[in-house]
Image (spheres, rainbow, N blue to C red):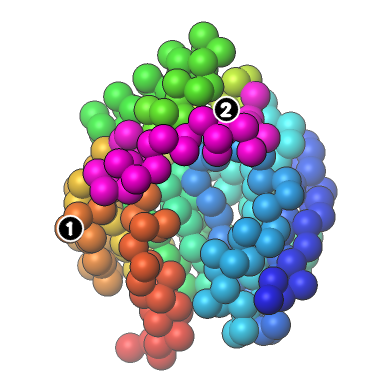
Amino acid sequence: MFYHAKEYNVEVPGGNMLCISFGNGKRPLVAIPGLRLSEMTGTAKVAALYYKIFAQDYQVYLFDRKDQLLPGCTVADFAEDIAAAMQKLSIRDADVIGVSQGGMIAQELAISHPELVRKLALGVTLSRPNDTVSKAVSDWIRMAEQGDMEGVIRDYAERASSEKTLRRNKAFLPLAMKLQKMLTPERFLLLAKACLSCNTYDRLNQIKCPVLVLGGAKDKVVSGEASAEIAEKLGCQCYIYPDQSHEAYNEAKDFNQRIYDFFSADPT
């Protein structure tokens, strides 16, 4: 059921990067998650279940950020770390999924290392800072600096979830926080501040591979407009979920199916 999901560290310049891999296929798929609030360690089975639609055709690689982060690190730095890990594992010409901050990283990867990316799917992400993300991230930074990670989690849930999901899950947030190993405020701060370093908009035309963009019209973290402007700039395929916010990748039942279909389609 879990396609032999395993976790291991990949040595990259300046540290080690946790990788989760699984799947029965030979084609490589690299998934780059967004800004996390909890540790990725111990989530291999959960990841394999989430990406199960890809497991039969692909060998899936899910990369965390490296363990040693320096002050002032950027999404471009994270992309170089991913590239180093892919090269270490002899992965190239991969289909790449980047969600939220992972989408920011994926853009940099496709621009700087086009040989590593065959097709690119970008979910609920942006190519340059805007008022929506600046307000959200600034609030999270302020809370994290005060050591209030519970406040960060609650605020994220309110911004990122659809109204229906928030009503259903709000009472379970305290339990969910107890069941997960949360990031330290220090690590979260470095990752959160990096979100504001994304600035690929004027370089998007350097992405030569086919791209699919998925977004949420009611996204209160990066805004739905941010996804739409990437697609407009690239002239690529795009679908904006009219009733979804930032957690469209978890809430929209066809999110991964749309990506799978895009990756499977012959280039036109």
> Marks 2 and 1, how far apart in space?
30 Å
Determine which quarter of the picture holds residue 222: top left
Magenta residue span: 157-184
189 vs 78, nearest the viewer? 189
Kindly identify the amino acid type of the residue bearing the numbered disc 1.
Answer: Pro
The x and y percentages for residue 39 are 66, 39
Closer to the eye: label 2 or 1: 1
The x and y percentages for residue 29 are 59, 71
The x and y percentages for residue 115 are 58, 69
Kindly identify the amino acid type of the residue bearing the numbered disc 2.
Answer: Phe
How many C-alpha atoms fall within 10 Å of the one at disc 2: few (<14), some, or many (≥20)? Answer: many
At horizontal 79% and vertical 38% (from top left) the residue drawn is 15
- Residue at image mark 1: 242
- Residue at image mark 2: 188
Q: Is residue 159 above or below residue 122?
A: above
23 vs 174, nearest the viewer? 174
**Principal secondary structure, stretch drawn in magenta:** helix
User: Is residue 61 inside the magenta stretch?
Assistant: no
